[in-house]
Amino acid sequence: NVPSGGGRKNPRAEFIAIDTSNILFICGGAFHGLESIVATRLRNSTRFAQFKHEDDFWRELKRRNETLLEHAVVSDFVRFGFIPELLGRLPVNVALKPLTVDQLVEVLQKPKNALMRQYESLFSLNNAQLKVSDNALRWIATQAARSESGARGLRRITESLFLSAMYDVPSKASPQRPVQVRVDAPAETELEFEDIGASVHIETVQSNSSLFDTHSINRL
């Protein structure tokens, strides 16, 4: 039973009965500290008993391509602070792995409201066309992967990258003088160097589609 008006339950309020037999409940989150609980249990188990040193334990996990959360069991969640009554209603535990760079690139482009499509729409309001190279997309995705912020980190990186262009384009573009915002980055083989970033250029487009008056406005 759930209250008809939402909010906290009131014994005197009306309740609506809901049949949950065909409803899939998914509870998720990042449980900081759970990994240390799992690690302590695993290191004391017979499966990893031969790895006395902590470094050997972590190397073995890496060799097996496993994460600690994949080994989490109900007792770990209880020690973390969950009540058994809740865990009894969540029979399946699944550990998610971080998104890869290729997957983050897809997040930037493919969803209906993808970030790149949002910026294309925003720039088009000011008579500007956005062109982002494949290298730049991979650079953005690589920065998000390095920060371990996942898909949420893409917004922060793109905001920093496009901030100057968002302010400069309105003063440079007009219906008679459209511009192109071009974003580029070094080849993927060079992305391992921290000091190499992506650059943003504003280029005026002539009627014959040739480019002139190139203006570099940002580099991250």
Image (cartoon, helix red, strand yellow):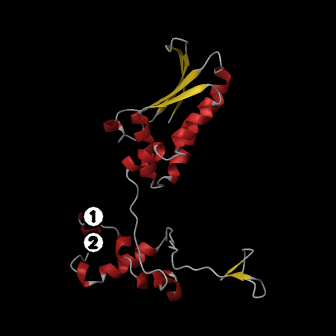
Q: Which circle, 1 or 2, is nearer the viewer?
A: 1
Q: From the viewer's perspective, is residue 35 above or below residue 194?
A: below
Relative horizontal placement of residue 74, taking residue 25 as reference (left or right): left
* Residue 135 location, quadrant: top left
| Quarter in which the N terminus is drawn | bottom right
The x, y position of residue 94, in whole percent, is 40, 71
Q: Residue at x 65, y 15 (%)?
A: 176
Q: Residue reaching furthest right? A: 12
Kindly identify the amino acid type of the residue bearing the numbered disc 2: Phe
Whole-percent x, y for residue 177 in the image: 62, 16
Cβ atoms under marks 1 and 2 closer than 8 Å: no
Count of marks placed on residues:
2
**In the drawing, what numbered circle is on residue 57?**
2
From the top left corner, tell me how far across and down residue 144 is, in percent: 46, 49
Residue 163 visible, this angle: no
Q: Which residue is mark 1?
A: 65
Q: Is residue 14 above or below residue 181?
A: below
Looking at the image, which is closer to me, 188 or 176?
176
Q: Secondary structure at mark 2?
A: helix
- Find numbered disc 1 in the image and state the secondary structure of the residue it sits on: loop
Q: Residues within 10 Å of mark 2 (few under 14, many from 20)?
A: some
